[in-house]
């Protein structure tokens, strides 16, 4: 991460919204379900799977939850109708986690039940900042008891994550539970709970992936770091993990050349496809929390077209 990246990230909240969209549009499918479907079809044509996210976390009223649930159900309907190779990802703050945990849990169970029971589709519960970690894991575990096609995200930069994964593996009834996505983590956290050194975070990531694979658990390896890709490929080879036992995951629009390289090495890839009218908050938060991505976005924006 450079000083230039940090400057770009800090400046973006003051940039006019239309210009922020120019920075962000490669990384967001658009405003509507139709936009998401179009992008997922393009990815599927390249043999890439998708997970669809309806933007709009950190809501201010529980009245906002029902429309979100209905939108996700429409997404599941269209995934089935169009036979898309896709599932959904949800953030619990979009379901009222910070307002009423039980209301949030009920709403999430409603949606996951719809996905699992009606369509046999999978729901990934994203992890947010550390204030949400315990409640997110609790709701995930409650959901998984009823609906096996439920997954969770674990952030490698949190010092607690290895213990969390070990416990989830030990308490899971049988394969393929738990299904975890390992990512580095982007929220700004204090040093007492989160690794700050880049290599420590990388090593934690690789160790978590190894913990999952050696225990025969399905893992999503969510990274844009070539070092992490190389090291996790070594783990896959070490344990002779088959392509249907894991997948690599990447953000829409980020490092497509690396994505193609991963595919060429025989691995499955899933791309995170966010859409919705709340794209502005998502983009400014993500760029502020991940300044290196801000610099990457600007470089792509000014790169000459081939």
Image (cartoon, grey):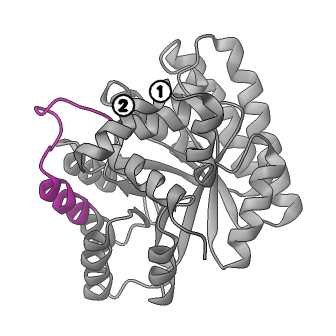
Q: Quadrant of residue 211?
A: bottom left
Q: Is residue 228 left or right of residue 294?
A: left
- Residue identifier under label 1: 13
Q: Residue at x 70, y 33 (%)?
A: 110
Q: Residue at x 69, y 56 (%)?
A: 121
Evaluate whether residue 7 shows in this view. yes
Expressed as whole percent of the image width and height from the top left, the position of residue 86 reads 68, 61
Give the structural element (helix, strand or loop) at label 2: helix
Give the structural element (helix, strand or loop) at label 1: helix
Residues 17 and 42: in front is 17
Q: Is residue 43 above or below residue 23?
A: below
Q: Residue at x 19, y 57 (%)?
A: 204
> Magenta part of the protein: which range?
187-208
Evaluate whether residue 122 shows in this view. no
* Residue 38: in magenta span: no
Q: Residue at x 78, y 36 (%)?
A: 71
* Residue 204: in magenta span: yes
């Amino acid at each position: 991460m450079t000083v230039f990246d940090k400057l770009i990230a800090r400046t973006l909240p003051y940039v006019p919204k239309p210009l922020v969209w120019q920075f962000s549009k490669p990384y967001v499918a658009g405003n509507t379900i139709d936009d998401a479907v179009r992008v997922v079809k393009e990815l599927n044509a390249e043999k890439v799977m998708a997970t669809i996210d309806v933007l709009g976390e950190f809501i201010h009223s529980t009245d906002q939850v029902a429309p979100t649930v209905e939108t996700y159900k429409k997404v599941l309907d269209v995934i089935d109708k169009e036979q898309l190779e896709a599932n959904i990802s949800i953030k619990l703050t979009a379901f009222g986690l910070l307002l009423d945990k039980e209301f949030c849990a009920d709403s999430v169970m409603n949606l996951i039940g719809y996905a699992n029971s009606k369509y046999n589709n999978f729901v990934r519960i994203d992890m947010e900042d550390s204030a949400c970690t315990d409640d997110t894991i609790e709701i995930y575990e409650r959901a998984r008891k009823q609906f096996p096609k439920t997954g969770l995200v674990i952030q490698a930069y949190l010092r607690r994550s290895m213990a969390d994964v070990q416990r989830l593996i030990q308490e899971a009834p049988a394969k393929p539970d738990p299904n975890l996505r390992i990512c580095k983590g982007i929220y700004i956290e204090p040093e007492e709970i989160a690794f700050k050194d880049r290599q420590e975070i990388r090593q934690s990531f690789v160790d978590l992936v190894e913990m999952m694979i050696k225990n025969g658990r399905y893992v999503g390896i969510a990274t844009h770091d070539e070092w992490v890709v190389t090291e996790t490929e070594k783990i896959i080879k070490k344990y002779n993990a088959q392509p249907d036992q894991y997948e690599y995951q990447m953000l829409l629009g980020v490092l497509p050349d690396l994505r193609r390289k991963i595919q060429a090495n025989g691995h499955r890839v899933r791309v995170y496809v966010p859409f919705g009218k709340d794209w502005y908050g998502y983009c400014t938060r993500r760029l502020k929390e991940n300044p290196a991505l801000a610099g990457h976005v600007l470089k792509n924006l000014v790169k000459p077209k081939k």
